[in-house]
Image: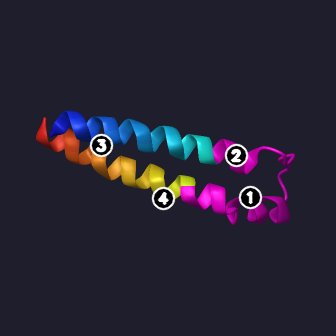
Amino acid sequence: MIFILIMVNIILLVIGQTLWKIGVSGDRLSFNADSILKLISSPYIISGIILYSLATVIWLYILSKE
């Protein structure tokens, strides 16, 4: 069971980082409020954050059990 959770954790982390990469590609990053707000409100970035958070919860569970 732990092995399966580790694999799910890895897959979620990779998908989350890939979504972040897609979310920031094509736009030049600048440090102004409008650019940051546009970046944060991107569906790719939001999805990546959700998946990364889920992976973190799974990782904490794995660490507590092993």
Density class for disc 4 (Cα within 10 Å; few <14, some 14-19, many ≥20) is some
Q: Earlier in the sequence, mark 2 or mark 4?
A: 2
Residue at figure coordinates x 81%, y 64% from the top left: 33
Which circle, 3 or 2, is nearer the viewer?
2
- Circle 4 SS class: helix
Classify 41 as above or below 51.
below
Residue 66 as seen in the image, left or right of residue 3: left
Q: Earlier in the sequence, mark 3 or mark 2?
A: 2
Density class for disc 2 (Cα within 10 Å; few <14, some 14-19, many ≥20) is some
- Circle 1 SS class: helix
Query: Is residue 27 part of the magenta span, yes or no?
Result: yes
Residue flagged by tag 1: what amino acid is it? Leu
- Circle 3 SS class: helix
Q: Which residues are magenta?
A: 20-47
Q: Earlier in the sequence, mark 1 or mark 4?
A: 1
Residue at figure coordinates x 69%, y 66% from the top left: 41
**Colour approach in the figure:** rainbow
- Circle 2 SS class: helix
Query: What label sits on residue 50 in the rendered view?
Result: 4
- Say which residue label 2 marks: 22
Residue flagged by tag 3: what amino acid is it? Trp
Q: Earlier in the sequence, mark 4 or mark 3?
A: 4
Residue 61 in picture, x, y percent from top left: 21, 47
Q: CA distance from mark 1 to mark 3?
A: 27 Å
Which circle, 1 or 2, is nearer the viewer?
2
Q: CA distance from mark 3 to mark 2?
A: 24 Å
Residue at figure coordinates x 33%, y 42% from the top left: 8
Query: Is residue 66 part of the magenta span, yes or no?
Result: no
Q: Earlier in the sequence, mark 1 or mark 3?
A: 1
Query: What label sits on residue 59 in the rendered view?
Result: 3
Residue 1 as seen in the image, left or right of residue 7: left
